[in-house]
Image (tube, rainbow, N blue to C red):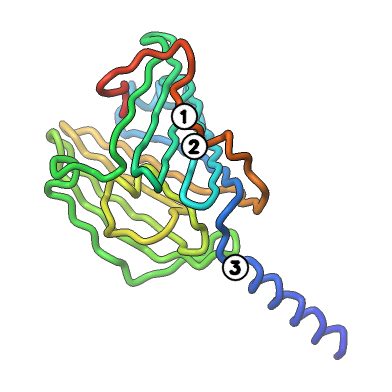
């Protein structure tokens, strides 16, 4: 009986620890894409999973992503200056970067509808709130199902583009895109969360040497 009580208390303590707000650490996630179009599906299969590592510290966040289509992409968010630096190393277009405001434009959010869902989901020990987002843009109908936690004090580029309507860091995102009779599904999910010290150098907003400034990066 004593052993059972000890196990229950220990499990409760682990749950409580997981729910403590984190202001510094590293998050790893993966993104998968699929389509009902055979040609596109074949291309997506060649790409495979897209892996992202996100570093966060106070009001700064850095995300590093690699995939075969767009190469290496790094995005740094600075909450103090409200600026976002994105730079990309692509085999076709070369090395380029852009600096923009974190706050989305009216054009970006035009027609976007964000609704707080009724469901919650526990992911890696974190209770996440559901949000549903719909948007029609450039002939595409987009529907997103997002689960966020307020216990990870980090910014996310996708969520920032939706304005201040979503409060939290996404641990799971599913986006369904329908355009010209073709359907595309993009699923992103966090696979690992580590509380650790992150160097301030990770959030340097100086564009890397050898990169050329551009108004808009490919795929952004």
Circles 2 and 1 in contact, beta carbons < 8 Å: yes
Direction from residue 103 to residue 66 in the image, left or right: right
Image quarter (top left, top right, bottom left or bottom right) of the N terminus:
bottom right
x then y, percent, for residue 117: 31, 67
Residue that numbered label 2 is attached to: 63
The residue carrying pointer 2 sits among few (fewer than 14), some (14 to 19) or many (20 or more) residues within 10 Å by Cα, namely many
Circles 3 and 2 in contact, beta carbons < 8 Å: no
The residue carrying pointer 3 sits among few (fewer than 14), some (14 to 19) or many (20 or more) residues within 10 Å by Cα, namely few
Marks 2 and 1 sit apart, C-alpha to C-alpha, by 6 Å
Marks 3 and 1 sit apart, C-alpha to C-alpha, by 28 Å
Residue extending farthest to the bottom is 1
x then y, percent, for residue 25: 61, 49
The residue located at (39%, 35%) in the rendering is 34
Q: Earlier in the sequence, mark 2 or mark 1?
A: 2
Residue that numbered label 1 is attached to: 74
x then y, percent, for residue 63: 49, 37
Direction from residue 116 to residue 107 in the image, left or right: left
Residue 100, image quadrant: top left
Residue extending farthest to the right is 2
The residue located at (19%, 34%) in the rendering is 179
On screen, 132 above or below 199? below
Q: Earlier in the sequence, mark 3 or mark 1?
A: 3
Image quarter (top left, top right, bottom left or bottom right) of the C terminus:
top left
Residue that numbered label 3 is attached to: 20
- Label 1: element kind: strand
The residue carrying pointer 1 sits among few (fewer than 14), some (14 to 19) or many (20 or more) residues within 10 Å by Cα, namely some
Marks 3 and 2 sit apart, C-alpha to C-alpha, by 22 Å
- Label 3: element kind: loop
On screen, 59 above or below 63? below
* Residue 6: numbered disc: none
- Label 2: element kind: strand
Q: Choose between 198 and 179: the one closer to the eye.
A: 198
């Amino acid at each position: 009986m004593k052993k059972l009580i000890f196990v229950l208390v220990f499990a409760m303590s682990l749950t409580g620890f997981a729910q403590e707000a984190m202001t510094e650490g590293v998050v790893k996630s993966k993104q998968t894409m699929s389509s009902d179009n055979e040609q596109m599906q074949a291309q997506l299969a060649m790409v495979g999973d897209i892996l992202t590592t996100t570093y966060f510290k106070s009001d700064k966040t850095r995300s590093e992503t690699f995939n075969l289509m767009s190469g290496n992409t790094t995005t740094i968010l600075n909450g103090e200056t409200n600026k976002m630096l994105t730079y990309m190393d692509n085999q076709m277009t070369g090395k380029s970067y852009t600096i923009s405001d974190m706050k989305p434009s009216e054009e970006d959010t035009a027609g976007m509808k964000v609704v707080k869902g009724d469901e919650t989901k526990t992911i890696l020990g974190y209770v996440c709130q559901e949000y549903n987002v719909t948007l029609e843009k450039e002939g595409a109908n987009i529907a997103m199902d997002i689960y966020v936690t307020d216990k990870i004090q980090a910014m996310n580029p996708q969520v920032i583009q939706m304005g201040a309507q979503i409060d939290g860091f996404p641990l799971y995102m599913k986006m369904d895109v329908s355009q010209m009779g073709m359907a595309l599904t993009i699923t992103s999910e966090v696979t690992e969360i580590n509380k650790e010290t992150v160097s301030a150098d990770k959030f340097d907003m100086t564009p890397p040497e050898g990169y050329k400034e551009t108004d808009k990066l490919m795929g952004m």
